[in-house]
Amino acid sequence: MTIPALSRLSLNQMTTEKYSLQETVDACASEGVEWLGAWRHKIEPAATAARIIQNSGLRVSSLCRGGFFPAATQEERKERVEDNLRAIDEAATIGAELLVLVCGPAPDHDILGARAMVVDGLSQIVDHAKTSGVRLGIEPLHPMFAAERSVVVTLQQANEMAAKFDAATVGVVVDVYHVWWDPQVYVEIARAGGRIFAFHVSDWLVPTNSLLMSRGMMGQGVIEIRRLRRAVEEAGYVGTIEVEIFNEEIWQMPVREVIQEVRACYLETV
């Protein structure tokens, strides 16, 4: 079984949420992790974060998150678009070629209307993204998050939205935690092809004590991670493999221990 190179491993900042950017990049550098998946609330101000990352020798695989386009009023939707334009600028500043989009919930009962707002919002930021050298990755979330985080809940929906735009600028993010359950996931991974802009890994624990905060290290749960990894590679994806884990217990661990466990589970399971 082919194991992906360690040089593809990226540590998403949410996996070390308790720690500062400086603490995380120092630990990554010490443990031989070359990539960082950044979060906007962890890189303020972006210019300072850019210097910290550059001095560490790390590269940035993505910035999370943009999106949240649907809103109840036109003014609110305009504010969401403006925030996404700022997110694109932040991504460019820290050297992230990808902005991950979590598209947001419906402001009322009209989930179809909210999905149309997502497409409209994308249409208003795509040119700025292209000129900034930043790609936009639509991340479908597990359906359990439809009411509060994302009206895009399947890879099929994400593919259909991305297909409305230039393939070089708008694509999809395949996060195993969100798509593993989908009976059409392998069909849609093949369909996405060159539009797969990122691949995120963690695991689905049983029992799941918290829908948001109960992700596990790879190999601790039920997801066929290696099969999904092979599928995205067969579709043409050869980029970073980003470990993104929301888990309070992991957040309490010393940062270097977290990264050591991430690296071990990556090599054994992914």
Image (cartoon, rainbow, N blue to C red):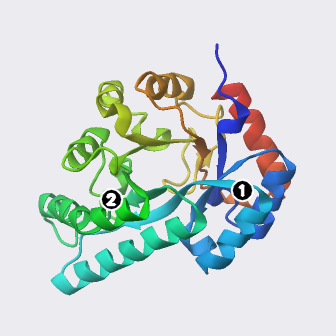
Q: Are there few (<14), some (14-19), or many (20+) residues within 10 Å of tag 2?
A: many
Taking 188 as reference, is 133 left or right? Answer: right
Please identify the quadrant where the N terminus is shown.
Answer: top right
Q: Measuring 65% from the left and 37% from the top, which residue is drawn there?
A: 8
The residue that mark 1 highlights is 249
Q: Nearer the viewer, residue 58 or 25?
A: 58
Taking 255 as reference, is 190 left or right? Answer: left
Q: Are there few (<14), some (14-19), or many (20+) residues within 10 Å of tag 1?
A: few
Q: Is residue 68 visible?
A: yes
Please identify the quadrant where the C terminus is shown.
Answer: top right
Q: Measuring 48% from the left and 53% from the top, which residue is drawn there?
A: 211
**Residue type at mark 2?**
Ser
Q: Position of residue 11 (x, y in %)?
A: 67, 50
Q: Nearer the viewer, residue 212 or 151?
A: 151
The total of numbered circles placed on residues is 2
Residue 218, picture quadrant: top right
Under tag 1, what secondary structure? helix
Residue 251, picture quadrant: bottom right
Q: Measuring 43% from the left and 68% from the top, which residue is drawn there?
A: 88
**Residue type at mark 1?**
Glu
The residue that mark 2 highlights is 150
Residue 18, compared with residue 201, is above or below; it is: below
Q: Position of residue 244 (x, y in %)?
A: 59, 50
Q: Measuring 37% from the left and 34% from the top, which residue is drawn there?
A: 194
Q: Position of residue 220 (x, y in %)?
A: 65, 34
Under tag 2, what secondary structure? loop
Dot 2 or dot 1: first in sequence order is 2
Q: Is residue 73 visible?
A: no
